[in-house]
Image: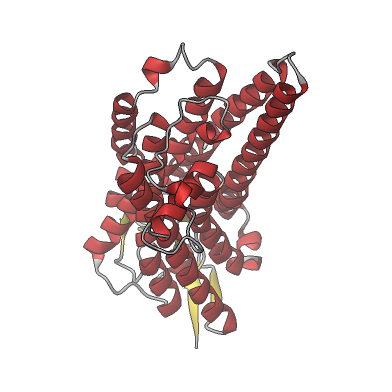
């Protein structure tokens, strides 16, 4: 089946390319429901399942075994919660793209987009705050101890959720399903409005957080290198091992975040001025949207599974104590995650 779809721009995970009953600048493209469409639908489903499963496991682990006993796990909990809720909107977008129409009504359209945006910004804000928290935890834990209590972390997390509401409020006004798709209304939003909206969401959702993460992670790695102990070989080896693990984690965090979100914003900005680029890479938009969602699947791995202590927690949760010793390590019984030992790389995760 082939349908004509008008050219436009899209924000977050919804494309104006999907408007069916109207056109923008009288430019149309065609979309074929072929093997590519089926493959994308399967990939959307896979990302949704993996994202929900991974983040749910992190949430259950923290609530059951850790009980948010440290500032670090408070942030990880809120990160997993935002990423998990971010996955909830994915089936709606996948069904829209696959069926070439929005079937859930205007109210659900606005609700899905607003909640989707809140979870996206909260997730990014969590990562930004975690970069600062890691720096304070390792560079001068005694000096910043009063700022890294679970109580303060919960207050900061609540503020992040509240602040995330404001950047996406315009979506409740300018997005609708009036044209068969849940997307921006071209008769309400001008090109200037769209450029402004896209610019400030890019700054708040990518540029500023990405810069903060690079600055604090670079300072963290530099501090580790400059503070190597001058003691015996064992202490020097331990410090070098910690530095190596932290460096790997930092590189992974920065690369994954940039890889998943930068293409999304590049395509958005190109759609404003490069019509021929959008026409040639229409399917690329669908892949970039999927890539932005897959970022939430990577977070449980980057911020939990890379931690030895979280791996022990997962082992305890998935392998009950009553199981046979040949299948479960009894050393995990009663293990509680804490980040008071600054020489443990897990404090960074």
The residue furthest bottom is 1
Residue lying at the far left of the rendered structure = 107
120 or 105, nearer to the observer: 120
Image location of residue 286, percent across then percent down: 54, 66
Residue toward you, 150 or 341: 341
Residue located at (34% from left, 28% from top): 153
Residue drawn at 35 percent across, 41 percent down: 66
> How far from the left and from the top, in percent, is residue 175?
33, 56
Visible in this render: residue 170?
A: no
Image: 97 above or below 226: below
Residue furthest to the top: 143
Residue at point 41%, 43% (across, down): 79
Q: Quadrant of residue 53?
A: bottom left
Toward the viewer: 169 or 298?
298
Question: What colour-coding does the image apply?
Answer: secondary structure
Placement of 20 over or under 120, stated as above or below: below
Q: Report the side of 118 relative to 211 (left or right).
A: left
Image location of residue 226, percent across then percent down: 71, 16
Visible in this render: residue 345? yes
């Amino acid at each position: 089946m082939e349908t004509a779809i008008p050219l436009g721009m899209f924000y977050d995970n919804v494309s104006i390319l999907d408007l069916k009953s109207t056109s923008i600048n009288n430019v149309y493209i065609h979309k074929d429901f072929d093997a590519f469409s089926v493959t994308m639908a399967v990939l959307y489903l896979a990302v949704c399942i993996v994202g929900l499963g991974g983040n749910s496991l992190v949430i259950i682990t923290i609530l059951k075994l850790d009980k948010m006993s440290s500032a670090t796990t408070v942030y990880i909990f809120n990160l997993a919660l935002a990423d998990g809720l971010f996955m909830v909107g994915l089936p709606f977008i996948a069904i829209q793209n696959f069926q070439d129409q929005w079937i859930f009504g205007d109210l659900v359209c606005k609700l899905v987009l607003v909640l989707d945006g809140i979870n996206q910004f909260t997730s990014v804000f969590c990562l930004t705050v975690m970069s600062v928290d890691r720096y304070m935890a390792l560079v001068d834990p005694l000096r910043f101890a009063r700022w890294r209590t679970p109580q303060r972390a919960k207050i900061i997390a609540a503020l992040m959720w509240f602040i995330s509401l404001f950047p996406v409020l315009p979506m409740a006004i300018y997005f609708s399903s009036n044209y068969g798709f849940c997307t921006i209304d071209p008769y309400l939003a001008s090109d200037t409005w769209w450029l402004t909206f896209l610019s400030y969401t890019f700054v708040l959702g990518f540029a500023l957080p990405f810069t903060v993460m690079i600055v604090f992670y670079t300072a963290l790695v530099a501090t580790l290198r400059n503070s190597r102990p001058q003691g015996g070989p064992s202490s020097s080896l331990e410090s070098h091992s910690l530095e190596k693990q932290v460096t790997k984690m930092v590189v992974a965090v920065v690369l994954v975040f940039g890889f998943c979100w930068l293409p999304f914003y590049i395509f958005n900005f190109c759609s404003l001025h490069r019509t021929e680029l959008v026409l040639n890479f229409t399917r690329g938009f669908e892949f970039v949207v999927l890539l932005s969602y897959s970022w939430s699947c990577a977070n449980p791995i980057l911020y939990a599974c890379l931690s030895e202590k979280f791996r022990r927690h997962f082992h305890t949760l998935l392998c009950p104590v009553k199981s046979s010793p040949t299948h479960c390590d009894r050393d995990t019984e009663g293990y509680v995650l804490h980040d008071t030992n600054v020489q443990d790389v897990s404090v960074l995760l």
